[in-house]
Amino acid sequence: MKQKIIAIFGLPGSGKTEVINYLMKKYNWPKVYFGEVTFDEMKKQGLEINEKNERLTREGLRERYGRLYYASQIIKKIEEMPDDSPILVESLYDWQEYLLFKEKFADDFITVAIYTSPKTRYERLARRPIRPLTFQEAQSRDYAQIENLFQAGPIAMANYTINNEGTLDELFTQIDKVIEKINQ
């Protein structure tokens, strides 16, 4: 079996980090995280990590280096990793990134969208211990990611979609079923 590149994506608060962490722990699979590119740049510039700076940095890097900057950086990381297990990709957002990954990895690029209603996501984002968001910040981030990063395309074209309105156990049961299908 060729190495699988499994991208888990969804809007903020959908549960993608929970799924990634679960899969990393259960299978000991490595991950690459698009957000690392943003955080590395913010550290380099000495910026405080908050929603406003994250957005400015994220959009600024894409404006300065092109829409495929993040994907090209992540693909480099993937190419440097051992190819003995699937690699998880967290936070692929942009439609052009999706297309580049499809071109590069073809059928070995598998996508899983985590869908959660805005109401549920905003409640989760307000409660999260790291980088909590207010309702207005969460909604603004959704709009920015849909309008500026074209995130709806990859979600709409996902190989698998999980509805995450329930408990973590229900979420993990769903992702286990998806992984069984991928491994067939």
Image (cartoon, rainbow, N blue to C red):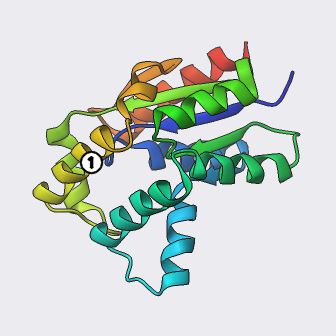
- How many labels, in total? 1
Q: Is residue 18 visible?
A: yes
Q: Quadrant of the N terminus?
A: top right
Q: Is residue 123 visible?
A: no
Residue 109, by quadrant, is: top right
Which quadrant holds residue 164?
Answer: top left
Query: Residue drawn 49% across and 46% down?
Result: 91
Indicate the quadrant containing the C terminus: top left, top right, bottom left or bottom right: top right
Image location (x, y in percent) of residue 176: 56, 27
Assign a secondary structure to mark 1. Answer: helix
Q: Amino acid at mark 1?
A: Ala
- Percent of width and height locating residue 56: 35, 66
* Residue 74 rendering spot, x and y as whole percentages: 67, 50
Is residue 178 placed above or below 139 in the rendered structure? above
Which residue appears at 75% of the width and 54% of the height? 77
Q: Which residue is mark 1?
A: 144
Whether residue 132 sits left or right of residue 110 in the image: it is left
Which residue shows up at 22% across the image and 44% down it?
143
Q: Quadrant location of residue 51?
A: bottom left
In this rendered view, identify the residue nearer to me: 162 or 103.
Answer: 103
